[in-house]
Image: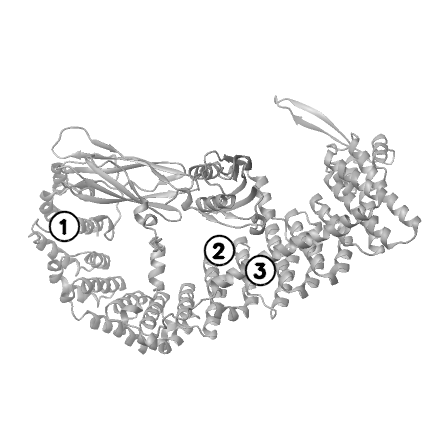
């Protein structure tokens, strides 16, 4: 273990700019100064020793002039000083002066002040010299009987560390602590004593636990946590003990402390897979989520519930708790709600789907009464999607859900209304028996729809699925009502001409004083007419859309009118009625065309929309059977194909998920019997406490790839040349939000290098957390220096710097070796993710940064192979279904999506083709457009794609 990896007890902030004082001035201050001066001098001595200075001449001065002082600050500083000062001679023997120090600490261990006793005991935990500790043992034992709990609990810790390091000094420690534990009343002392017994003598710890197992619920939470850890370790090492302690774990689920409940639930799941145990643990997790106010805690515990669900045998138990899980929806946080709804949807079955739908319907109605808020809209969307999925999986539920959801088509939030519309479109196509109900509800809410996009979709559904004469006439009535008075152009001109009529209200308000840009006052008369505002409000919705210049809805209306007119002709035999209906439909289209060509709308009609409406007019005037087929049959077939492809894709992904979760055991796999397993093999079972500690420290062991190039050696960056006086190389360890640089520094000279400092700086969104401390390197010596860099966003970062040092005995300035740059790879932060097509399009429209990358020098000749290569090198996920990419036609377009660990989205659109005229061996050409919210993300991904154009053949 290198010096940098030793356990660090005390962190001291060192001001780098101060000039180091001389030994003589320090000696003078320590001898003759007052308490304040001695305190400052002692601090400087500590800092100098930490920087590698030896200062042997000051040791006796401190013992004579500082050690006898009773000032608490000085006593605290002395504890730090004795911790870091060299206590042995070069040949390893203890310094004579230390006997005096030892005597001083024996006195401190008998001091009447409990703080001095306790802090001295804490200091003794850090001593590694048995000769110093031996004379102090009687005093340490005596501290176990001190009246103050602070002294007693630190005495237990001191005995534990001494027993662990030098067992011969206190061989009866477990017995001593066991007796102490039986008589002790203070919770913190009991916790420390019990912790020591767990690690030093587990049998004694179990004996103690057996005697008080019924009182465990009355203990303090710190002791309960240690008891949970003991039971976990004992039961994993010796499964036969489970029956003895599992009741205790059940009792701890009722603890008043959330931390104990969480640990007890986690332990119970690992000890037993019985349905009652899983149910109790899951119930405990749900209570924790509801009662804890911190959203991070809620998300962590939700993750534990999701982990439980992943186990096939536990899923059935959790299905009975779906209604309890839905109680979590009372939390206002969107992320918690999203996870909860996903979990409930995964667990829903035919037994509980009805109750689930009732709860979700109530939640949807609740969102309607809440004041508008961004998260309310998103939550409503989530609820709509969940109900949609429930209705697709359980068609019987659709009839209950649709009437409630269709009220939201008139919602101001377009995204939620679009989700409802998508759901209605799928339901009306799949469930024939619901068509009359859906059409009836659609006609009810049609006039109230506020968004043009939703209006277009509603028109399409009505045009496609109105099959009776009455429904068709209702649609025509609604369209006429929504268009207002026709011809539109004439009626609008009349309105404009007669704008101020006698019945209009004209109000005169008080004159208003306004301040101009120059700071002077201007007076404005408040003669106003309420007519224009009223005119805007009274304008029917479709007329409003057209006058705003949105003629795409007119093209959609023309198609709908054509479909219902052709269907009306086939339903009604009377020629007069047929012609009358067709004429009305053609009149509406003609008046819209006339409006588009006039100057009334804000934007003129586009040529595409003119062509579409003209085509519909032509179809209605000719009524050919071919066109009838195209309008009334082919459109529905296209929708049917799209929905079946979507369903097939969903089933395929569900099948993949279930295959992942099902644990497959090969016929020739060995069977592991717990009773026959050797003790050393038992350790292969992962220790949850150890794993959580490693995860907190960022030391989780990732499975290394079989390829040696992908191992740790691949992440070592050489920073200086082999001929430089100081050789340096760094291993770059990337955690989620920070980077740890482990730099190996080697002194290649025959001189001692003093104040050898690693100076680093960063480019990009990286921030150096702390400056590495200076080192002293002996000739041909080496050391490891660790540096932490915080990462704030996803973009390529560069770390650069140099190593500076002084050569001992040389009079020259400081020497400097410049280091090579370390480039931080963006791929460490990007993870594949998925989103719906609608979300992709919305983000594509919103994101302002675009980076277009063209392929000029790739050597890949196959389109599919190129796409897979891009996916692999950018860590993105392809959203375009496999079915759409299959086959070969010489070109390909695909959408890719990824999300960074900082929550930044990255979108990419790949458009590639194979130039056939250049022969079969011609490389792929085309471009990729990348869009992101931040410039750094778009540029970094573009650079990554540019670098990985060519496929390397290994």
Residue at label 1?
Answer: 67
Q: Residue at x 56, y 48 (%)?
A: 885
Horizontal relation, residue 230 to residue 552: left or right: left
Q: Which mark is residue 295?
A: 2
Q: Residues within 10 Å of mark 1 (few under 14, many from 20)?
A: some
Q: Residue at x 47, y 64 (%)?
A: 661
Element on which disc 1 rests: loop
> Is residue 330 visible in the rendered structure shown here?
no
Residue 711 at what x, y percent from top left? 32, 50
Q: Nearer the viewer, residue 644 or 375?
A: 644
Residue 96 at what x, y percent from top left? 6, 52
Q: Residues within 10 Å of mark 2 (few under 14, many from 20)?
A: some
Label 1 to label 3: alpha-carbon separation: 77 Å
Q: Earlier in the sequence, mark 3 or mark 2?
A: 2
Q: Earlier in the sequence, mark 1 or mark 3?
A: 1
Quarter assignment of residue 28: top left
Element on which disc 2 rests: helix
Q: Quadrant of the C terminus?
A: top left
Residue at label 3?
Answer: 651
Residue 236 at what x, y percent from top left? 34, 71
Quarter assignment of residue 209: bottom left
Q: Nearer the viewer, residue 852 or 345?
A: 852
Q: Earlier in the sequence, mark 1 or mark 2?
A: 1
- The image shows residue 524, relative to residue 333, as above or below, that is above
Residue 792 at what x, y percent from top left? 42, 42
Quarter assignment of residue 230: bottom left
Element on which disc 3 rests: helix
Q: Residue at x 58, y 43 (%)?
A: 889
Horizontal relation, residue 451 to residue 25: left or right: right
> Is residue 488 visible in the rendered structure shown here?
yes
Count the labels in the image: 3
- The image shows residue 305, relative to residue 675, as above or below, that is above
């Amino acid at each position: 273990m290198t010096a940098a990896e030793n356990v660090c007890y005390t962190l001291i902030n060192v001001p780098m700019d101060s000039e180091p004082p001389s030994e003589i001035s320090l000696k003078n201050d320590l001898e003759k100064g007052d308490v304040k001066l001695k305190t400052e001098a002692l601090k400087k001595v500590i800092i100098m020793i930490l920087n590698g200075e030896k200062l042997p001449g000051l040791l006796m001065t401190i013992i004579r002039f500082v050690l006898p002082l009773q000032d608490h600050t000085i006593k605290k500083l002395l504890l730090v000083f004795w911790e870091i000062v060299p206590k042995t001679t070069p040949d390893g023997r203890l310094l004579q002066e230390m006997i005096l120090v030892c005597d001083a600490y024996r006195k401190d261990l008998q001091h009447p002040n409990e703080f001095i006793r306790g802090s001295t005991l804490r200091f003794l935990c850090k001593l590694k010299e048995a000769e110093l500790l031996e004379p102090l043992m009687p005093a340490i034992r005596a501290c176990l009987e001190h009246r103050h709990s602070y002294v007693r609990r630190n005495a237990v810790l001191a005995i534990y560390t001494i027993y662990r390091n030098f067992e011969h000094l206190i061989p009866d420690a477990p017995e001593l602590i066991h007796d102490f534990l039986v008589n002790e009343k203070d919770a913190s002392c009991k916790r420390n004593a019990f912790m020591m017994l767990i690690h030093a003598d587990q049998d004694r710890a179990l004996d103690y636990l057996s005697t008080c197992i019924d009182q465990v619920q009355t203990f303090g939470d710190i002791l309960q946590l240690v008891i949970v850890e003991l039971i976990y370790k004992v039961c994993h090492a010796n499964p036969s003990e489970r029956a003895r302690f599992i009741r205790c774990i059940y009792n701890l689920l009722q603890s008043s402390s959330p931390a104990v409940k969480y640990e007890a639930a986690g332990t119970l799941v690992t000890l037993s897979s019985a349905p009652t145990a899983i149910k109790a643990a899951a119930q405990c997790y749900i209570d924790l989520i509801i009662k804890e106010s911190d959203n991070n805690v809620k998300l962590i515990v939700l993750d534990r519930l999701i982990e439980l669900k992943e186990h096939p045998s536990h899923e059935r138990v959790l299905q009975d708790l779906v209604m309890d899980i839905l109680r979590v929806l009372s939390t206002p946080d969107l992320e918690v709600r999203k996870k909860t709804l996903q979990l409930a949807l995964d667990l829903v079955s035919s037994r509980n789907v009805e109750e689930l739908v009732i709860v979700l319907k109530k939640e949807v109605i609740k969102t309607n009464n809440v004041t508008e808020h961004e998260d309310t809209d998103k939550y409503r969307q989530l609820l709509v999607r969940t109900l949609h999925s429930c209705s697709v999986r359980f068609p019987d539920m659709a009839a209950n859900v649709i009437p409630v959801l269709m009220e939201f088509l008139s919602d101001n939030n377009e995204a939620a209304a679009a989700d409802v519309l998508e759901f209605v479109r799928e339901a009306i196509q799949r469930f024939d028996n619901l068509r009359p109900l859906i059409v009836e509800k659609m006609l009810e809410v049609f006039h109230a729809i506020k968004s043009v996009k939703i209006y277009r979709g509603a028109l399409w559904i009505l045009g496609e699925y109105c099959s009776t004469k009455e429904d068709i006439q209702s649609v025509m009535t609604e369209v006429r009502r929504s268009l207002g008075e026709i011809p539109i152009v004439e009626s609008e001109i009349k309105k404009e001409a007669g704008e101020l009529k006698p019945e209009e209200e004209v109000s005169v308000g008080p004159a208003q004083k306004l301040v101009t840009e120059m700071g002077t006052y201007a007076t404005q008369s408040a003669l106003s007419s309420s007519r224009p505002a009223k005119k805007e409000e009274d304008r029917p919705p479709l007329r409003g859309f057209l006058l705003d210049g949105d003629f795409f809805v007119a093209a959609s209306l023309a198609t709908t009118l054509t479909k219902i007119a052709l269907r009306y002709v086939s339903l009604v035999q009377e020629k007069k009625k047929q012609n009358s209906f067709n004429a009305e439909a053609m009149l509406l289209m003609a008046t819209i065309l006339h409006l588009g060509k006039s100057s009334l709308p804000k934007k003129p009609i586009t040529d595409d929309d003119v062509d579409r409406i003209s085509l519909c007019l032509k179809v209605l005037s000719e009524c050919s059977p071919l066109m009838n087929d195209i309008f009334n049959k082919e459109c529905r077939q296209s929708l049917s194909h799209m929905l079946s492809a979507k369903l097939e894709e969903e089933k395929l992904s569900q099948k993949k998920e279930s295959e992942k979760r099902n644990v497959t055991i090969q016929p020739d796999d060995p069977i592991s019997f717990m009773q026959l397993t050797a003790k050393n093999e038992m350790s292969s079972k992962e220790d949850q406490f150890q794993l959580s500690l490693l995860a907190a420290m960022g030391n989780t062991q990732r499975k290394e790839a079989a390829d040696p190039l992908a191992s740790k050696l691949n992440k070592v960056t050489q920073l200086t040349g082999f001929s430089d006086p100081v050789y340096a190389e760094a291993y770059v360890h990337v955690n989620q939000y920070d980077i740890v640089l482990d730099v190996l520094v080697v002194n290649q000279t025959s001189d001692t290098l003093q104040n050898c400092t690693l100076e680093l700086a960063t480019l990009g969104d990286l921030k150096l957390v702390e400056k590495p401390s200076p080192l002293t390197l002996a000739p041909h010596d080496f050391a490891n220096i660790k540096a932490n860099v915080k990462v704030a966003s996803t973009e390529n970062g560069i770390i650069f710097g140099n190593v500076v040092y002084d050569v001992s005995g040389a009079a020259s300035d400081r020497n400097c070796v410049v280091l090579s740059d370390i480039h931080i790879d963006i791929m460490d932060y990007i993870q594949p993710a998925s989103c719906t097509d609608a979300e992709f399009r919305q983000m594509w429209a919103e994101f302002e940064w675009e980076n277009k990358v063209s392929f000029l020098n790739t050597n890949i000749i196959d389109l599919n192979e190129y796409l897979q290569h891009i996916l692999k090198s950018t860590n993105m996920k392809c959203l375009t279904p496999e079915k759409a990419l299959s086959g070969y036609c010489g070109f390909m377009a695909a959408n890719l999506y990824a999300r960074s660990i900082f929550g930044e989205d990255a979108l990419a659109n790949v458009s590639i083709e194979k130039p056939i005229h250049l022969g079969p061996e011609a490389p792929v050409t085309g471009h990729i457009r990348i869009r992101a919210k931040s410039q750094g993300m778009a540029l970094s991904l573009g650079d990554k794609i540019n670098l990985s154009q060519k496929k390397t053949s290994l």
